[in-house]
Amino acid sequence: MMPWGHAAFGYTLYSLGHRVWTRAPPSAQAVLALLFGTQLPDLVDKPLSWGLHLFPQGYSVAHSVFVAIPVGLLVLALGVYKNRATLGAAFVVGYWSHLVGDILMAMMEHQRSPFDRVLWPVVTLPPYGHEVSLLDRAFHIIGTFFHSLSTEKQLLILGIYLAPYFLVFLLWVVDGAPVVAELKRAVVGR
């Protein structure tokens, strides 16, 4: 899943869950904590693999349920202790939704063992078939996306690809555009 996919998936889960729980849209601070949580596993593991070559794949320490569960519980406990339970919960939903998203993507790709991505160090994924660097990987991901748009069915592909993001965007607007609304109030003063 791409970074924006993790962000959209996590935002949807958190926003809808928060509305069910509190009958209110999420706050800007909670959205920022959530977004950080949705990106954290890749911000840790991809550089360790692609940049520093410490792991054979970009799924290791931060993607591991053996790390994510204790870290999440610790953040929740710290949030409760500091009277910031909402921020702790938002971070945990973001972090854990990242792992769920990676498992779901592996299932959709019909991988034999979709849970392997989150079982480090019990399971270590085999190395990539070739040397991977951060820039190579970024260019490959972007190139693959743009190549998919150069086919005859590009409008259909683009529509299918963008439809879920449009729905998340609408949910964000219904929520009052958290973060952007607060920035606007800070700048404009209203």
Image: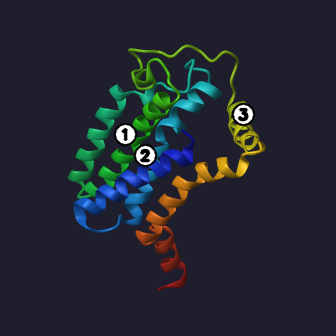
Q: Amino acid at mark 2?
A: Gly
- Give residue 37's mark: 2
> Which of disc 3 and disc 1 is earlier in sequence?
1
Considering only vertical position in the picture, is 173 above or below 3?
A: below
Q: Amino acid at mark 1?
A: Trp
The residue identified by callout 1 is 96
Instruction: Please give the name of the residue rendered at 23% of the width and 58% of the height, measured from the top-left corner.
Output: 83
Instruction: Please give the name of the residue rendered at 49% of the width and 33% of the height, measured from the top-left corner.
Output: 105
> Which of disc 2 and disc 3 is earlier in sequence?
2
- Give residue 140's mark: 3
Instruction: Give the Cα separation between the discs numbered 3 and 2.
Output: 25 Å
Query: Within 10 angstroms of label 2, few (less than 14), some, or many (20 or more) residues?
Result: many
Considering only vertical position in the picture, is 24 above or below 129?
A: below
Q: Nearer the viewer, residue 116 or 161?
A: 161
- Residue 62, given in percent of the width and then of the height, sits at 44, 31
For the N terminus, give its image quadrant.
Answer: top right
Q: Is residue 181 left or right of residue 146?
A: left
Secondary structure of residue under mark 3: helix
- Residue 24, given in percent of the width and then of the height, sits at 29, 68
- Residue 4, given in percent of the width and then of the height, sits at 55, 49
Q: Is residue 92 left or right of residue 181?
A: left
Front tag of 1 and 2: 1
